[in-house]
Image (tube, coloured by chain):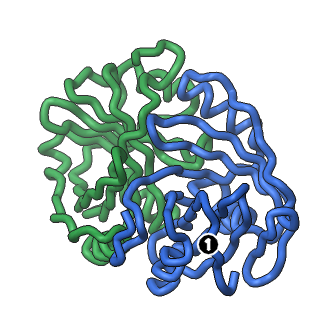
Chain colours: A green, B blue
Amino acid sequence: MNDATGLGTRKLAQIAFVVRDIDEASRRWAGLLGVPVPEVQVTDPGREARASYRGAPTDAQAKLAFFDLGGVQLELIEPVGEDSAWAEGLSRRGESVHHLAFWVDDMKRSAAFLEGRGLPLIHRGDMGEGQYAYFDGEEQLGTMVELLERERTELDGS
Amino acid sequence: MNDATGLGTRKLAQIAFVVRDIDEASRRWAGLLGVPVPEVQVTDPGREARASYRGAPTDAQAKLAFFDLGGVQLELIEPVGEDSAWAEGLSRRGESVHHLAFWVDDMKRSAAFLEGRGLPLIHRGDMGEGQYAYFDGEEQLGTMVELLERERTELDGS
């Protein structure tokens, strides 16, 4: 999957929406899909995740809820605080699709690939032994792209 | 899968973007994913597909391109003509995610379910022996929803 000419994977992991009220949005999707309302999770504060947003440390958080769409996760995100890709997305487009997420094996390589194609890294943070990173693909693709990595490689300039 | 309390399926079939230039968008996604640029397809004229949009017949078409994201299709849509859910989406949000699509076994039931939840049917058409239908979920979900059916059930009021 470490195709040197691409993102590093072709398998979609998540499609994520930003929402204003995660409880309300979770109820709507649960009703639509005919499943129980999932538990809402809250991300660690940004400083605990060594998070950065547009070049500066950020302490922003998010409330998250997940649904299984048959091998792809539907993620709902309510931003908590400012200075995050989540708050930026909600501010830019209102409640809507925020990003498509992909697991990669070599985030550093995949990040360089995306940045080389005009999708700048705008927000990253640690996630257990791994990390997440958002790339602004609004102009190129009409959405943000998130890369997820299970074992962290160090990123520059994030 | 014919859960009487839900949409009728929980499996995401497609995530679709509307774009202004399908050739350019296809090249971008092909480069991103490291795959060949797919062939562009053109839908039948709306009148041949018995298509209707917001209560009136429409002759609108679309250019389509598809990528495999590991069990989920990525669909790119360039509207051709006006009076379609595709043109409406592009006009409303610019190049962005247009809809999430699901295959259902009983479109008539699933359509009634969505309409009962405040997602009106705005555009439908025949597709071989089956049909497609778009529901405006902008207010409820932040996106349109498309239902796809292999053997056509008759819909009212479309």
Decide: is A24 above or below B128: below
Q: Nearer the viewer, residue B54 or B125?
A: B125
Residue in the foreground of this view, choosing between A74 and B44: B44
Which residue occupies 51% across, 70% down?
B106
Amino acid residing under circle 1: Thr
Q: Quadrant of the C terminus of chain B?
A: bottom right
Residue found farthest to the top: A4
Q: Position of residue B154 (x, y in %)?
A: 65, 77
Q: Quickly name the residue at label 1.
A: B153
- The answer to whether residue B34 is above or below residue B123 is above
Q: Residue at x 24, y 42 (%)?
A: A51
Rendered-image quadrant of the N terminus of chain B: bottom left
Spot occupied by residue B56 in the image (x, y as percentages of width and height)? 81, 81
Vertical position of residue A140 compared to residue B143: above or below: above
| In-image side of A47 versus B116 (left or right) | left
What residue appears at the point 33 percent right and 50 percent down from the top-left corner?
A73
Q: Chain of mark 1?
A: B
- Say what secondary structure mark 1 lies in: loop
Using the rendered image of the protein, determine whether residue A28 is visible from the camera's viewpoint: no
Q: Is residue A132 left or right of residue B28?
A: left
Q: Is residue A155 visible?
A: yes
Q: Is residue A98 left or right of residue A75?
A: right
Residue drawn at point x = 24 percent, y = 55 percent: A60
Tally of numbered discs = 1
Q: Position of residue B116 (x, y in %)?
A: 47, 86
Q: Residue B22's quadrant in the figure?
A: top right
Foreground residue, B145 or B157?
Answer: B157
Q: Position of residue B118 (x, y in %)?
A: 49, 84
Please tell me how crowded label 1 is: few (under 14), some (14-19), or many (20+) other residues with Cα within 10 Å.
some
Classify residue A142 as left or right of residue A125. Answer: right
In the displayed structure, would residue B154 be above or below residue A75? below
